[in-house]
Each structure stands twice: as structure tokens, then as C-alpha cells.
Amino acid sequence: MKVLLGIGGSDDSIRALEKTVERTADAGDDLTIAVVDNPAVERSREDIETTVGDVLGDHGVDATVLRLDGDPGSALVDLAENEGFEQLVLGGGQRSPMGKIQIGNIAEFVLLNSHVTVTLVR
Amino acid sequence: MSPRTYSEAVADPYEAPPLSFTDGDNRTIELRAYDGSDEELEALVEMYDAFDPSDRAQGIPPGREDRIRDWLDNILGDDCLNVVAWSDDEVAGHATLVPDGDAYELAIFVHQDYQRAGIGTRLIKALLGHGRESGVEKVWLTVERWNRAAVGLYKTVGFETSDAESFELEMTIRLSEPDEAA
């Protein structure tokens, strides 16, 4: 399956990276990882790309890694729809101190707008 | 995320627990601060284990006993404030304040057997009274915007909407002036 993972550097997106790379290793998916600019995150894109490289290396998985500029939600949806992806994967939200799941702005936009199947990783 | 906004005005001071009242179904309900005992913990686990999953909000309460225990372990900590509504030795409802920087996050749950009997309003007022007495200055919560009963309850006790841009409404309340806080 042709899978697009969007990662902006939040903790839930790093968890989505780990789980998706694990699944790719098991299922033999064709994985593309798009690093987006999440304004809510302080981590730099270089730092995120290093993490992506480490996780891919740990699992011996090959993936295309690219950078997406502009609004992250719309850039991800655009890429997924125009490049024939079958699934768009994102982090499934952060937890509040209370333990409530809080869906981020990128996931909210993607869920409401994507014509490609969306997976939120918990 | 932008910092939360809180009203300049301090909300009505509510009475702190212990309190007792008769609910809309003629049951005697006692409101008490959680005492940390095994008995009270087990009664809470039992209430959440029997909680209707359709009344979950943003993933809480979780749905399996081991997850309920992990979650309760987090929100019943020493730095949290908890008030329990009792019907004899059964838990009818539970409200909690969990520290988050200089504020507290609030959540409240009333078991299905005890809903629509006026317990939620009494319980949240008792929790806010307990919070004010304990020096809590600011409280925030999120609520699913379609949950009009809950939004109405929060407005009734003095919460104001602080962020309507996300999936969930965010609401805040000020319980005491900064210099009043303990």
C-alpha cells in the first residue's frame, strides 16, 4: 500500500513515525514521510529529519523523506490526493494533564478535508 | 498554542465539602473530598468500570479496568484535588482538578444511574469550593461542543468560553485573585 506519513515533530507525531515504520517493515508498504512545519512545535526540521533517519535505520526500512512547505494540513492533503496515496497517517493527538485526547490543528484539517483514507495513530 | 484567557472577575465563592443534599430522585447524596483510602479508590474503580462508554469525553474515562486504574493513579495524586459524590457507599459521581502549570484542568463524571438528578451542579460547585479553599486561582476545561448539557452546567457555575476554534470548546474560570491564593 502507498502510505504517506505526515510528521511535524510533536510527541504524538514521533509515536506515529515509530508505529508506521514498524508496520511498514511488517507489511512491506511503500512509505513516504513528509516533514511539515508545525507552528506549535519548537523542534527544528533538521532535528525531526535526524529522528526520522534514526527510526528508519533501526528498522531497516527504506522510505522517501521530503519536506513540505506552507500550511501543513493542506499541503499533506494535496500531496496525498495528487500522488495517488492510499493512506495518510498522522499522530493521534496529545494528552491533556487530565488524560484527555486533544487532536491538533493539522489532524483536524486533514480529517475534515482529505479524500484519502486517514489513520490517526494512538 | 496561545495562552488561555481568564475572566478578570472572580467567580462566586461556592461552599466546600463535606456537604449533603437530597437529589431529584429523593436519594441522599454526600459530597466529600477524596480521602485516599483503598475503600474509596475501589469504589471509584467500580463506578468507572460500570460507566457507559457513550458518555466518554476525549477518551476518558478509559474503558478497561487496568487503564482505569492507571488513569485514576494520575488524577488522584497528592497534587490533585478530588471530590466524590456518595450514595451510601456507592460512588454516584466524581470531579477532579489536575495541576497544569499555574492553573488546574477540571473534569466531572456522574454515573448514568445518577444523571439528571441535580448531582452534577452540586458536585462541580463543591469541587470549585474545595479548589478555592485550597488556593486554586485558575481552572480550565474542554468540552465537546455538541454536549449542550455539560456546556450549560459549566456556564451556570461561572465558566466562560476562552477558545472556540478547536474541535472542543475550551472554558475557563477564575476562583481567586493572584494575591488571595495561598
Image (cartoon, coloured by chain):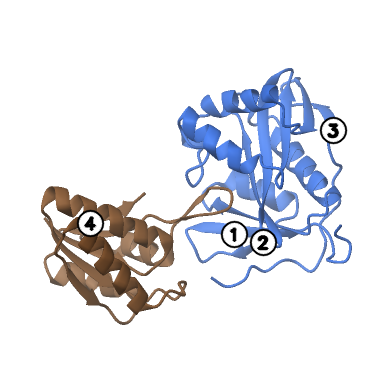
Chain colours: A brown, B blue
Give how far apart the Cα atoms at labels 3 and 2 are.
27 Å
Give how far apart the Cα atoms at labels 4 and 1 are.
34 Å
Mark number displayed over residue A21: 4
Q: Residue at x 29, y 59 (%)?
A: A17
Q: Residue at the far front: name it.
A: A58
Q: Residues within 10 Å of mark 3 (few under 14, many from 20)?
A: some
Q: Residues within 10 Å of mark 2 (few under 14, many from 20)?
A: few
The residue marked by circle 4 belongs to what chain? A
In the rendered structure, which disc, 1 or 2, sits on the residue that comes first in sequence?
2
Circle 3/circle 2 CB separation < 8 Å: no
Q: Toward the viewer: B11 or B139? A: B139
Does residue B24 appear anywhere in the picture? no
Q: Residue at x 69, y 21 (%)?
A: B39
Q: Which residue is mark 2?
A: B101
Image position of B98 with respect to B100: above or below:
above
Q: Which residue is mark 1?
A: B170
Q: Toward the viewer: B59 or B114? A: B59
Could you tell me residue A50's position as x and y percent?
30, 72
Could you tell me residue B162's position as x and y percent?
63, 65
In the rendered structure, which disc, 3 or 2, sits on the residue that comes first in sequence?
3
Q: Which residue is mark 3?
A: B18
* Amino acid identity at mark 4: Val
Give how far apart the Cα atoms at labels 1 and 2 are.
16 Å
Please tell me whether mark 2 sits on a helix, a strand or a loop. loop
Could you tell me residue A61's position as x and y percent?
16, 60
Which of discs 4 and 2 lies nearer the camera? The answer is 4
